[in-house]
Image (spheres, rainbow, N blue to C red):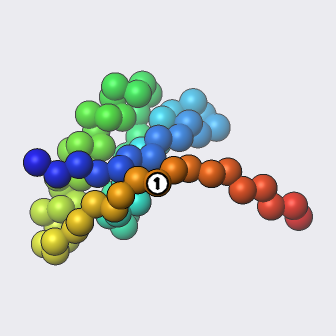
Amino acid sequence: MTEFNVVIEKDEDGFFVASVPEIQGCYTQGKTIQEVLERIKEAIEVCLEADGEDIRPMKFVGIQKVEIIG
């Protein structure tokens, strides 16, 4: 079993959007947290099969918001 870091955000329409930083282009959305978690598991499996390369999860350190004025 391999664990991946998943980032979940809420868009302007109220949908939850999940992405996997370690896998480029691996993301999905859902109306609820539960739905987006189920869908991201499926997306990870599809992305891993399609990539065919050995993707190694990164160690989670933290999240920081950075404000840009402009």
The amino acid type of the residue labelled 1 equals: Val
The x, y position of residue 21, in whole percent, is 40, 60
Say left or right for 37 vs 18.
left
Question: Residue 31's quadrant in the figure?
Answer: top left
Image x and y of residue 24, in percent:
36, 67
Number of labels in the image equals 1
Left or right of 66, for residue 4: left
Q: Position of residue 67 (x, y in %)?
A: 78, 55
Residue 2 appears in the figure: yes
Please tell me whether residue 32 is drawn above or below residue 59 in the rendered image: above
Task: Look at 35% across and 58% down and name the residue there.
Answer: 59
Q: Is residue 64 above or below residue 53?
A: above
Within 10 Å of disc 1 (Cα), the crowding (few <14, some 14-19, many 20+) is few
Q: Residue furthest bottom?
A: 53
Q: Give the SS element for disc 1.
A: loop
Tell me the residue that label 1 is attached to.
61
Q: Is residue 24 above or below residue 28?
A: below
Residue 22, position as x, y percentages in the image: 34, 63
The answer to whether any part of residue 27 appears in the image is no
Which residue: 42% across, 25% down?
Answer: 32
Give the residue at x 48% y 35%: 16
* The C terminus: image quadrant: bottom right
Give the residue at x 51% y 33%: 15
Between 25 and 67, the one lying in front of the other is 67
Where on the picture, by quarter, is residue 53?
bottom left
Q: Nearer the viewer, residue 31 or 64?
A: 64
